[in-house]
Amino acid sequence: MPHRLLAHAADLARAPSAHNTQPWLLTRDGAELVLGYDPARALPIADPTRRDLLLGLGAFVEVAMIVAAEQGYAIAFEPGVDHEAHTAGRFVAATAPPQRAHAAADVQARRSSRTNYEPEPVPADALAATELAVMGDGLRIEVLPAPSVVELLADGDRHAWADLPTTLELKAWLRLTRSDPRYEEDGLSYEALAMSKAEAVALRAMLARGVWPWLRRIGGPALLASFSTPVIKRPGSVLVLVGDPSSPEATLTAGSGLLRSWLELHRHGCHTHPLSQVIDAPDSNRRLHERLGLDPVAAWNQTGERALAIFRAGRSAQPVRSSRLEPGRFLPDT
Ligand SMILES: Cc1cc2nc3c(=O)[nH]c(=O)nc-3n(C[C@H](O)[C@H](O)[C@H](O)COP(=O)(O)O)c2cc1C
């Protein structure tokens, strides 16, 4: 029965993942389907705790459950994360189809938007529905005014750009020219990043081998950080997904909730723009948790209630759709 999911690869492929690495792999094990990941598509430098990897895999599971619910497939997912074997759990037969509020059409329509947002908070009805969408899994949503996050974002960005290994890892997933052979496959296209062609050319030149190590020392990180903050300077909302996952499996489950929140916002006409660098950098992480009234030390040590994801949300122009690998690339051979 879980095998029936394989006919819906085009929907499964639309799951979101950090840097659009699309790490998921499906293999057969008898009647079951094992969800694994390609370690070459994890982000060991930017995501050492594997938080984003597990959130993305959880989002993939959520898409699978949406498909199963829509098609009436009696399928469940049993999480079981094994980083030695690069597996995250398995799709198994269940007695009844799962129930989901969203449809595959919602999955196809959702996209991250990094353009300017209208200067309004997320409407109250959208927020209430989003809070409801994550509640079951012990998650909740906190709302911050977008301008109050400007300094945190700048700090997170500066920290990321100042670290050479982080920049090199990101660079491997940037698709800054259409002539990149992987432009239509994976990673972050300059168009999906809402950059103009000229901006992409400039960033490419800055990150060129032999240039960036030098620029990095003379203010390159601050300069690049200054480009990302205008998008949240205008009034609007930044949403934080807060939870206390005490195991990799619980973090994966939170990824399903994260996607539900994005789908719910999209259904209400709102786009989302994740700002994970705020969580990843120690200073911005501490200030974020202080602002949320949560213990910053515990949060940095991955215990207690903490921010699992942070994203700008609101109405924006329609963004360019991100690329995906051929769905066959993550399916079992036979
Ligand atoms: C766990 C997670 C973390 C992410 N972090 C960021 C981020 O920090 N900045 C960003 O611009 N996009 C971030 N994204 C968005 C992905 O880049 C995006 O989902 C991917 O490129 C696919 O595009 P789509 O969301 O439009 O389908 C994140 C996505 C996930 C699932």
Image (tube, rainbow, N blue to C red):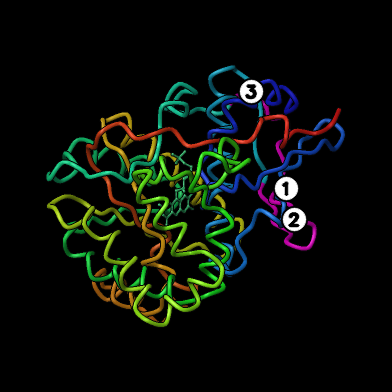
Of 130 and 84, the residue lying toward us: 84
Q: Residue at x 53, y 19 (%)?
A: 70
Of 209 and 221, the residue lying toward us: 209
**Which quadrant of the rendered structure holds the C terminus?**
top right
Specify which label sits upstream in the sequence, 2 or 1.
1
Asked if marks 2 and 1 touch (Cβ < 8 Å), the reply is yes
Residue under label 1: 36
Q: Residue at x 22, y 45 (%)?
A: 116
Q: Residues within 10 Å of mark 3 (few under 14, many from 20)?
A: some
| Residue 51 shown left or right of residue 115 in the figure | right
- Say which element carries label 1: strand
- Say which element carries label 2: loop
- The stretch of residues the image draws in magenta is 79-97
Specify which label sits upstream in the sequence, 2 or 3.
3
**Residue 219: image tag:** none
Disc 2/disc 3 C-alpha distance (Å): 23 Å
Q: Quadrant of residue 6?
A: top right
**Residue 8: image tag:** 3
Q: In the image, what residue type sits under mark 2?
A: His
Q: Residue at x 23, y 53 (%)?
A: 231
Say above or below: 35 vs 301: above
Q: Residues within 10 Å of mark 1 (few under 14, many from 20)?
A: many
Residue under label 2: 86
Percent of width and height locating residue 150? 22, 65
